[in-house]
Image: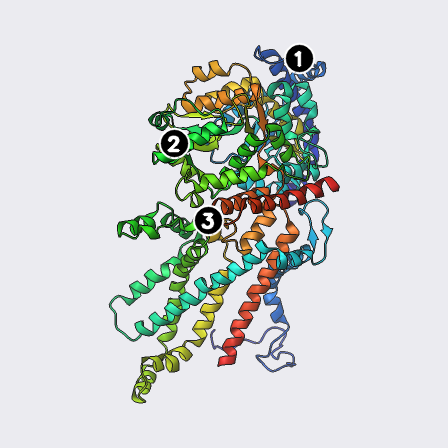
Amino acid sequence: MRETTLGGRRARRVLHPRTTAIASLAAVGLVLAACSSGGSSTESSSAAPESSGATAAAASEAPAEAVELWVQSGNGGADALLAGYEALNAAFEAANPGVTIRFEVKSFTDLVDTLPLQLSGDDVPDVTQVNQGYGSLGQLVGSGLVAPLDDVAQANDWEGRQGPALVGLDGRFSPDGKTMGSGDLYGMSATGAWVGLYMNMDIAKELGITAPPTSLEEMEAMLAKAKESGKTGLMFGATDGGEQIWLMANLLMAYTSPQTVSDVINGTSEQLPPEMLQAAETMKAWAEAGYLTEGWAALDSTEVLGMFADGEGLFALNGSWNVFQSDTPESFRLVPFPLGDASTIAAIATGDLPWSVPTNAKNPDVAKAYINFITSPEASEIWIKQGQVPATVSGNETALVEANGLTGVSADAVLSWVNVMQNGTPVGFPDWATPTWYDTIAQSSTALMAGEITPQEFVDALQADYGTFTAERMGS
Amino acid sequence: MSLAPVPVTAGGRRKSPPRSRAPGEPRRIGYLFILPAVLVYAGFVFAPFLHSIYLSFFEGNGITRMEFVGVANYVDIATNPVLRSAFIHALELIVFYSIIPIAIGLLLASVLHRSRIRGVAFYRTALFLPYVIAPTAIAVIWRWILAPRGPLNSFLEAVGLGALATPWLGDFTWALPSVGLVGTWVMFGLALALLLAGAQKIPLELYEAVRLDGGGLWTEFRAVTLPGLRYEIVVALVLTTTAALRNFDIIYVMTSGGPGNATVVPSYLVYQQAFKVAQIGAAAAMGTVLILAIVGVNLLITRMARGSS
């Protein structure tokens, strides 16, 4: 008994790659064919290459081999997002007979903490979400744990779907993992995530404010007005660290330019721009002026957004991904953080955790077809139906948002994303710059805003971390 | 075992070969019995520990090539203010986890065991309960109590002490004592249970003798209670200081080391460096120093106990 099982298992292992190769070619062919024929009119001309037609034909002759595609998500807790994936998984299985999807969901932390170890083994998912940045995807690329996606990306014009800026931001790395934002493509996002300014228009009306601020000066005047009337200006919670980092990046964008902040994140220079000091001074000034939620240093982002949804505070700085988890009234707005003037539109706006194919994946071709499918313009419709922000901009968003009854911040989440993608600059998350920067910024900014350290000490702490990592990365 | 005579076996062997040692002496076969435990211990505790010491001399993310850096990681612990502050915080937590609970426990034990209070067993159980609850649950409860708009601040405001209300866990001065007092709350039940059990075996005649000799309450405590509880105190010290030094869950849930670095402790840094920023060597060095610190403190405690007996 024992012997046969062992033998059987070994035999299956030997057979595996070959059978899956055939099956996956078939699947890729099917998907490519489906994309090119059934694609919506807005899809930029992505005629499927000749070869894919041939494989599709070959596939229909061969009996479909059963392939179990192991898909690993790090979106645990985001139910609406997961519902979207469920719908897409069903559609993918229907379009690819013989493919069944094993969809495994982990929490974000769980995913990010365990990925390097998991992917360095043999038993790896066929396709997995990863986190952007030098400390995460960069490390996986540099260690050779994820495979490039350029072939399928070029064949299906992924840059046409999402724009070269966003595709580069989410998934491009030099093969040594040392340069972010350019090079080969290692990840592609299905949905968008951006950080903006939530605004309670009811409180705004009480204060005599009619429209969201279009410049930083306007916003500061509004904060002061709120303070005078005894309202909280900016709902702020610091224990997760994210809000300080977003505030810092947005202020730095206002004082320099979106491109400068992108360069900082990609690490083109070892030296932080001098305007960082100005950003630090503003953060400290806002905290000292009492613009922020009382007790902000002990509150977390979710708590604070909950209070905001309950009608407290004029502004909140938070992610588009949180829109659907709180029942914000319809009059609320979600807009890009105001920068220098009305003509500059930019936001921390990136794909949600990009999808990558591990180097050791058993079904790499089906995996690539899967990524191609969930980032297609057709998938966008499913995303909007779920109230999510599709990373792929199809041009139909306004109609789809109306058709699906999205209003208030839910509609803004999609439409402001399209605005940033079409008319502005998407910028990455600052903590991608070094593996330790998230903690350094989070800790130092809390100390800065609580008056424990000076703006100069804050900048020095950030520069020390940033300079060391960037020098090491560029040096070796 | 029946005492009936054992029938002689077929071969007629009724005598065992001559013994080479007295009956009851240790035999080599004994090692066979502890072998499974030793293997498990060696495989899952000792070998990983040695490996982690080995890793602590390298720098890298644990996947690609690791670079040998000698004792640089240890030098870093001694010189980097954040890493050093983690150990200072751990020492401060010993006061809250160990010294305060045992002091309270001693006081209560010396009172409780001599007076007849109704339902002592109930109180003992109630006070011991925090030690049994999962630390994560405790941390969540206390996080809520200490929240800026939590019950504690509401209470302070209700009784007119609103000026004292503060975001406890977000305050650079109060965050560490706040976390520490949660430890006191957890550990004090354990200390009390241990010390009460010990106090019950102290003969009451000894107290009577002190009284006859004209001694007061303080003399009773110093001459009878304290020496009588020596071993219980050592056990309580070992358990609570270890808990203080390796504290992770409560910090992780309540403050994640914040605000700033105000509540960073060694175990949290081990986790952060190993899993968050992929500095395996630094994490291993931190872990090694932490284990040495725990072993060192425990040796010191047991040595002191032996010295005073």
Please say whether residue A82 is visible from this viewpoint. no
Which type of secondary structure does the marked residue at label 1 adopt? loop
Amino acid under disc 2: Lys
Query: From mark 3 to mark 1, how far is it between C-alphas?
Result: 52 Å
Q: Which residue is mark 2?
A: A225
Q: Chain of mark 1?
A: A
Residue pushed farthest right?
Answer: A476
**Residue drawn at x 51%, y 34% as measured from the top left:** A75
| Crowding at mark 3 (Cα within 10 Å: few <14, some 14-19, many 20+) | some
Query: In the drawing, what numbered circle is on residue A47?
Result: 1
| Type of colouring | rainbow
Q: Residue at x 66, y 43 (%)?
A: A467
Establish if A365 lies above or below A32: below
- The local crowd at label 2, few if under 14, some if 14 to 19, many if 20 or more residues have their Cα within 10 Å, is some
Front residue of A2/B86: it is B86
Hey, what amino acid is under mark 3?
Val
Labels 1, 2: one chain: yes
